């Protein structure tokens, strides 16, 4: 077993592990006390001498980085937040894994400085300070959000956990057995009835058929990476059960498109209550309008140190757009989502 710790003081904007993992961005972690998404305060928000561990199995490549398609190995990672640090235990060196999955190198202070200066956004950042956007592998993220249709977050987590326990590879660690998220091939081999028995309901054929598409190839959700934003969203909708909203979730929480704004129930509530002029009648136009509204303030510095007016857009390999007015709209959306869902 390997052990280590990361100082939260060294992370710009701090870190709230519980909010990051239990804010509806990811359903691939579980709390070892069995209380994931139970509706109470997350551990980071309460004083406790023995905060619970979060644990998951993640595919890793030969260099120890998070695996995107066909990992060379599996790592079990346990992490908790205690006394100003992230403590971890793992089968592997978890430092690079946690930095990747939890986006620990994001500059939260600079991102908040670019956000619109209006009441709902200010309140959202105040109540969820330290929450980060996750960066999960694309296939598990796609399946997770196919399962999310018309479901509360606790039930989505239950479905993803059931899939993982039933079809995922078992990995031994510290006297226990944990399961990786199933491979596309393993999920494709499951029958619709078997998936329904796990509680997936009408989502079962969508999960099975998308897994079959990925297993058979050539298309994979990761192929959207690096495409222009709206082309990437359109690409993802070719998978069964993936509409515009699910595609935006995959872009935001997996593929690094921090300008993606999924139009879920809560963001539509925000539009209705605070940003009525952004309701443009269909998904594409409304998405574009709310991205513009939640994006970079014209008087704010961009996260990379430039200004939106002076510096031309620059696209990273992950498709993340910097220097654009909507560059971090997805971060603002995630804070609003949590704020409205829990107020």
Image: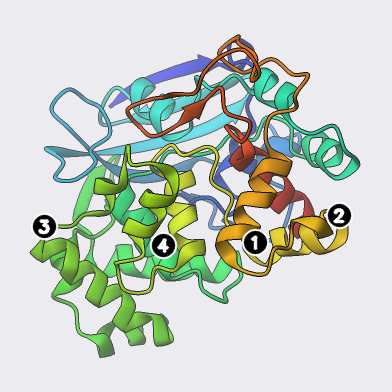
Q: CA distance from mark 1 to mark 4?
A: 18 Å
- Closer to the N terminus: mark 2 or mark 1? 1
Q: CA distance from mark 2 to mark 3?
A: 43 Å
Q: CA distance from mark 4 to mark 3?
A: 21 Å
Residue at the disc numbered 4 = 144
Residue at the disc numbered 3 = 218
Which corner quadrant holds the N terminus? top left
Q: CA distance from mark 2 to mark 4?
A: 29 Å
Using the image as rendered, state which of residue 95 and residue 13 is in the foreground: 13
Q: Are the residues tagged 1 and 4 within 8 Å (C-beta)?
A: no
Q: Residue at x 11, y 60 (%)?
A: 217
- Closer to the N terminus: mark 1 or mark 4? 1
Using the image as rendered, state which of residue 50 and residue 65 is in the foreground: 65
Using the image as rendered, state which of residue 117 and residue 204 is in the foreground: 117
Residue at the disc numbered 2 = 274
Q: Are the residues tagged 2 and 3 within 8 Å (C-beta)?
A: no
- Closer to the N terminus: mark 2 or mark 3? 3
Q: Relative to 165, say whether 40 is above or below.
A: above
227 on left or right of 114 = left
Q: Nearer the viewer, mark 4 or mark 3?
A: 3
- The answer to whether residue 60 is visible is yes
Residue at the disc numbered 1 = 38
């Amino acid at each position: 077993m390997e052990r280590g710790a990361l100082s939260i003081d060294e992370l710009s904007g701090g870190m709230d592990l519980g909010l990051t993992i239990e804010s509806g961005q990811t359903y691939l972690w579980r709390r070892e006390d069995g209380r994931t998404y139970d509706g109470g305060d997350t551990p980071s928000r309460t004083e406790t001498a023995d905060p619970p561990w979060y644990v998951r199995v993640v595919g890793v490549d030969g260099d120890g980085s998070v695996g995107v398609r066909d990992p060379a190995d599996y790592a079990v990672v346990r992490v908790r937040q205690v006394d100003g640090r992230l403590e971890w235990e793992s089968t592997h060196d978890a430092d690079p894994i946690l930095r990747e999955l939890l986006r620990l190198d994001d500059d939260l202070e600079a991102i908040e400085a670019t956000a619109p200066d209006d009441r709902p956004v200010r309140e959202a950042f105040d109540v969820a300070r330290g929450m980060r956007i996750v960066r999960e592998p694309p296939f598990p993220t796609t399946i997770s959000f196919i399962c999310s249709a018309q479901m509360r977050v606790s039930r989505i987590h239950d479905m993803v956990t059931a899939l993982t326990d039933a079809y995922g590879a078992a990995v031994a660690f510290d006297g226990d057995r944990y399961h990786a998220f199933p491979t596309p091939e393993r999920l494709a081999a499951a029958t619709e009835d078997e998936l329904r028995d796990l509680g997936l309901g009408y989502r079962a054929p969508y999960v099975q058929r998308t897994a079959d598409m990925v297993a058979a190839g050539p298309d994979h959700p990761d192929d959207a990476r690096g495409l222009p934003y709206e082309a990437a969203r359109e690409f993802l909708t070719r998978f069964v059960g993936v509409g515009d909203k699910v595609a935006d979730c995959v872009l935001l929480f997996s593929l690094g498109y921090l300008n993606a704004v999924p139009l879920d129930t809560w963001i539509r509530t925000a539009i209705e209550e605070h940003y009525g002029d952004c309701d443009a009648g269909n998904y594409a136009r409304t998405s574009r309008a709310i991205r513009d509204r939640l994006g970079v303030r014209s008087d704010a510095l961009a996260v990379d140190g430039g200004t939106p007016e002076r510096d031309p857009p620059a696209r990273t390999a992950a498709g993340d757009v910097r220097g654009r007015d909507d560059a971090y709209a997805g971060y603002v959306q995630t804070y609003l989502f949590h704020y409205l869902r829990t107020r």
